[in-house]
Image (cartoon, rainbow, N blue to C red):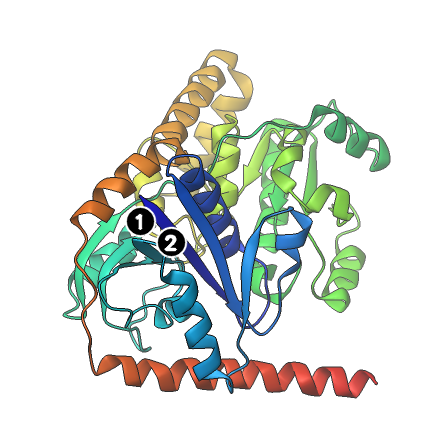
Amino acid sequence: MRVLILVSVHDKPYGGHYHTTLAYFNALRNSFRDTKLLVIGNENPHWITNLGIQAEFVRYNGLNLVSAYKKVAKSAEDYEILHAFDEFAYFFIRSIVEKKVICTRCGGPNPEKRYFPKVSNLVCLSRENKIFFERSSKIENCILLPNRVPPFEINLELCANARANYDIDSSKLVLLRISRIDAYYLKSIEQTITLGKELSKIGGEIEVIILGAVYDKKLFDELNSRYSHVKFISDEKYTKDAKRVLGLADIVVGTGRSLMEAALKGKVMFAPVKNRDTPELMTKENIKHFLNTNFSERTIVNTSRETSLEYLKTLVEELSVLKDYKVWITDYAKKTFLLESCPEKLEQFYKNASVEKCSFDFYRQMIRVTSVFLRFSLRKWFESSSHN
């Protein structure tokens, strides 16, 4: 089976969307005879060259639609399965005849008030997306595959280096949040810091660490000034592949992929919630509820905060309870998040997938894709012009 993986870049080329694409690409090329990655966008993303990935790049800025479309179609000729990891990449392959075309929805809120294209074969990473799309007349065939994390190892040397450079006290419990530092994640960062204060009341001294690349320097400086007791780690050698330093943490606040990665290493896990100012502890009773929304800040909880804190106090004070927790969450993560079993499931989905059908919806999506890429291309041009 020959599979072409496609992903688009039109704005900021970072985030879980790209990590998921790369994880699938690496898993599939180890399972199938020929797997290729094709990137469509207005810039060649740095993560391709940084990771040494052999990938084809097709430049598209919103104006060169015909030439970009022809290049993608040419690249797709030798492949049986065309698998797009976002709706924009899907546009460039949806009208290629005699091919099985797959689109993956990489999490995020449901597009209830926003256009989403007609798709014959859709893969969803979260249950909330699957339930939503199954009700849509635009989607013919839909499956849920939450698996997206490949096996990985913690870099103990790098962890020791971070402890020394940032004076992280090994006698304290370490609460870690891995997150880009920008306005979008400000609420979860502040929730983590508030959680640290609550944990200190029941578990002794807590070291709170926010680890992530800085995308808003002004906000970063404000956070450093406001929370002097918190350690902000933004050095690229730690943030570039942050899961390698999960060994620093005893407790992790995570969303989406970052939660899944930490759970695989048996950490005590919290996730941000919409209706509280502190994250919620993951337990056997609530983890499926959080999985429904991809462990995102959109989750609403109804259990009392006191119940969660009481259970956490037990985890801290009784080693046998903590050991059982670590075994449970590791086993759950391996079954639910690990990507190893995914190629087999995808192969079956590929075999059962229908051939893409022509639709007038193609022209509607063409207008959307063109306008989005053109808008971001113009913004980049204005930004570069203002710096010259």
Q: Secondary structure at mark 1?
A: helix
Q: Amino acid at mark 2?
A: Thr
Q: Which residue is painted at 44% across and 28% down in the image? A: 311
Q: Nearer the viewer, residue 62 or 33?
A: 33
Q: Is residue 161 above or below residue 304?
A: above
Q: Is residue 37 above or below residue 169?
A: below
Image position, residue 147 (x, y; %): 37, 40
- State whether residue 272 appears in this view: no
Which label was assigned to residue 243? Answer: none
Residue 140 falls left or right of residue 271? left
Q: Which residue is mark 1?
A: 292
Mark 1: few, some, or many residues within 10 Å (few <14, many ≥20)?
some
Q: Quadrant of residue 333?
A: top left
Q: Amino acid at mark 1?
A: Asn
Image position, residue 284 (x, y; %): 33, 30
Q: Nearer the viewer, residue 299 or 117?
A: 117
Q: Secondary structure at mark 2?
A: loop
Q: Which residue is painted at 51% across and 80% down in the image? A: 373
- State whether residue 54 appears in this view: yes
Image position, residue 146 (x, y; %): 34, 44
Q: Quadrant of residue 245?
A: top right
Q: Which residue is mark 2?
A: 299
Image position, residue 107 (x, y; %): 38, 56
